[in-house]
Image: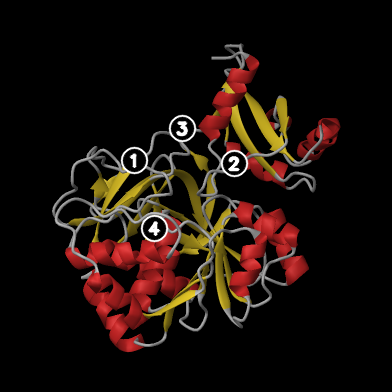
Amino acid sequence: MLYDAWLAVVRERGVETALWEVESGRRWSFADLCRVAEAEAIPGTGMVHPQGHSARFVVEVLRGWRSGRVVCPLEPGQQPPAVPGPPGSCRHIKMTSATTGSPKVIAFRESQLAADAENIVATMGLRPDWPNLGAISMAHSYGFSNLVLPLLLHGITLIIAASPLPEMLKVAAAGHPHLTLAGVPALWRAWLAAGVIPGTVRLAISAGAPLGIGLERTIHEKTGLKVHNFYGCSECGGIAYDATPMPREREEHVGQAMRNVRLETGPEGCLSVISRAAGECYWPDLSPALGDGRFVSADLAEIIGGEVHLRGRLGEQINVAGRKVSPEVVEAAIRSHPEVRECVVFGVPSGSEDRVDQIVACVAGVAGSGVADLRRHLLDLLPAWQVPRDFWIVDSLAANGRGKLSRPEWRRNYLSRSGGV
C-alpha cells in the first residue's frame, strides 16, 4: 500500500526536487529516489532499520516498503528492540520516548501510518511549494510523520540539515523563499537566541515537549512568526493542533482535535483518541489502552468549546496533604518568569505522613540569589501549597534527542544528590 502510494507520487512529481541533503550538497528528484530504492537489493528476512539523519534514512524506508518488511526507525547508536516480529498485518514499529517510564514498542499497519500523514497534511496545511526543513530526528514519531511521510506519500520536498545548530539552519534555509520548519521547544529557544530563525518560514511547528507561552510570545514579538503548538504521541500520531494566528493565552491549551480525529475524556479525566492513525497494539505486551482505533492516554484533559486543555498526567500528580497538584501546572507558572530557561517539577517523599509529598522544582536560568524573587512570582500565580518547597538551581536541563525532559530521571538525580531513596 505505502510503496504503491509512493509510486503514484513519483509519477506525478517525477523530475521535481524531492530531497536536498545540505551537508553533501546532493539533490534527488522523486524519480532519482525511486531509482536508488529500486536498485537496492531486497532484504531477505528481518526488519529494516533506517538510522541517522541523511538521505540514506529515506532510501532505507523505501527499501523496507518495497520488500514488504517491517520498518523500525532508530536513533543514531540505538539498538533494535529485542521483540519478535509484530502481527502479520503490521509493517512498522515505533518506540516510545521513555520520558515517563520504560520504552514501549508499538506496532502499526500501513494504513495507520498513511492516516497520520493525511491528518497532518490536512490540518497543518503542508504544501509542496513550502519545503520541510528537516532539523529534527526523522526516527522519532514526530519527525517521521511530519517529514518523511509527507515527502513519500504527499510529494512535499524535504531539506535535510545535518544538525539543528544555528549555522547549519542558516545554510539550509538559504535560497528558499517559502519554508515549513518543525522544531522542539529547546531548538526554538536556541534558534531565537542565535537570531537565525529564517525570515522565509511560512509555517512554524513545535512538538515533542510543552511549548511555553513565554517563548511562543517572544518569538512572535521579535520575528512576527507564530509557532503552532502540536500535541501528539507515538501511539496515535497527531492529536491536537493550535491553528490560531496569534500566540496562545494559556500554556495548557494545546489546540483543537486534528482532522479526522475524535477526542473524549473518560471517568478519570484521561484523554481518549479515536483515530484511524491509532496504532494496532503495544507489542508484544498487549494493553487495553491501545487497539481497535482507540488510544487511552494517561494525559488528564478537559475539552472546552472544542479546545483541548491538558491538566497533567495520571500517576504523576503530587499528593500534598491530600490535595493533588499537576507538575505541569507548576512548571507553566515557573516558565512564565522572565529569567527561567527551562524547568521540571516532581514530588519527593516529604518525611511527613500528613503531607505525603513535597514539591521540588529543578530550574535552569535563575541564579541562586534569584530564588526568592521566583518564589514571590509563583505566590502571585499559585496557591501557597502549590509553590515548591525546594528549588534545585542547575546550569542547564538537557533534553534528550527527542526534545523531552524526563521527569523520572531528574527525580532520581535529585534523590541521589540529596541522599534520598
Name the N-terminal-most of marks 3 and 1: 1
Q: Classify mark 3: helix, strand or loop.
A: loop
Q: Nearer the viewer, mark 4 or mark 3?
A: 4
Q: Nearer the viewer, mark 4 or mark 2?
A: 4
Q: Amino acid at mark 4?
A: Gly
Q: Classify mark 2: helix, strand or loop.
A: helix
Seen at 71% across and 61% down, the residue is 192
Which residue position is annotated with label 3?
Answer: 315
Q: Amino acid at mark 2?
A: Glu
Name the N-terminal-most of marks 4 and 3: 4
Circle 1 packing at 10 Å, graded few (<14), some (14-19), many (20+), is some
Which residue position is annotated with label 2?
Answer: 328
Q: Quadrant of residue 346?
A: top right
Q: Amino acid at mark 1?
A: Lys
Q: Classify mark 1: helix, strand or loop.
A: loop
Q: Which mark is residue 104?
A: 1
